Amino acid sequence: MRLHDVSKASQNEAAKVLSDENLKKLQNVLLMMLEDLAEICRTNNFKFVLIGGTGIGAMRHSGFIPWDDDVDIAMSRDNYQKLCDIIRNDYSDKYLISDPQDKNNFGKIIPKLRLLGTKYQTVLDSPNENVGIRMDIFIIENTFDNSILRYLHGVACMFFGFALTCKRHFDGRKKYAKLSNSLSFKIKSFLGVLFSFASLETWARWTDNCHKICKNNNSKFITIPSDGPHYFKGLNLRSNICETRDVLFEGKNMWVPFDVDNYLKSIYGDYMQIPPENKRVRGQYLEFDFGVYDV
């Protein structure tokens, strides 16, 4: 669950909120996808970790946050590349994995694992995009042990991420204007014209290339620059994030970062405190279809 997602705060009249019954069905489908992914990882000797709202759900509810409509996981760049190869070679009849380097990735910097034969279209999705029920995959990136290089890497990642956001706001200014009228939106839309010498997909590829520039898989520090806290707030010791702890999630064995408590506190504060009902934001959709998974 990306807590900062504009679509979840949208009051767009065309968007609808899932009923409790359909939300539960959606969570069951997402759990099936998580189990499939966990089995792939165990078979091929690598892991992912639950982060974001899914991490909060694991620690606070031993499963989904009751009103959550998506799944957030993270894995190292190397393991992500392994997963891409496995999905495309062995599971292409069931899953599609989108990547920032894809030609038709609609400027998305966060890879998504999508379930074929389903649909869950939000107000931020392109009409031409495959919008199967999905989980977000946040890539854990190496960063430099040298503090100066690490700082320069961070500045570069922040610049490319900002440019990509501005370009996205500019390209979608008519649609997004219906979702937000904030000063931040207006500024980014205005600045987006400065970055229009390249396409949205090109900016996404450049941003991804910047994220993965450090090739040291044993670096002391890592970061998750595509996540909400971005590069600098996402900096952490490799041992805190890449080493894992077992956790039960909806009765299934999953993994969270070894230092999951401090990780979640650093981003969300007292994440164990259940928010009041008026702060429990439900995801909004334009269209959904469970396909053969409507059980």
Image (spheres, rainbow, N blue to C red):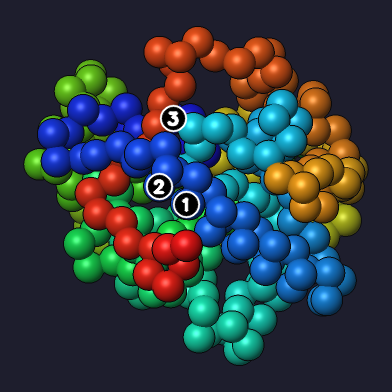
Q: Name which residue lies at 77% across and 47% down.
A: 251
The amino acid pointed to by label 3 is His
User: With 61 as the anchor, is 169 left or right in this view?
Assistant: left
Disc 2 on helix, strand or loop?
Answer: helix
In this rendered view, identify the residue nearer to me: 270 or 293.
293
Residue 73 is situated, as x and y percent measured from the top left of the image, at 64, 50
In the rendered structure, the answer to whether residue 250 lies left or right of residue 106 reads right
Residue 225 or 270: which is nearer the viewer? Answer: 270
Q: Tell me the number on the disc at residue 26.
A: 1
- Name which residue lies at 28% across and 23% down: 184
- 26, above or below 46, in the image: above
Tag 2 residue = 22
Which residue appears at 56% of the width and 54% of the height?
A: 28
What is the C-alpha distance between the residues marked 3 and 1?
21 Å
Which is nearer the eye, 157 or 87? 87
Q: Are marks 2 and 1 in contact (CB under 8 Å)?
A: yes
Q: Is residue 113 visible?
A: yes
Of badges 3 and 2, nearer the viewer stands 2
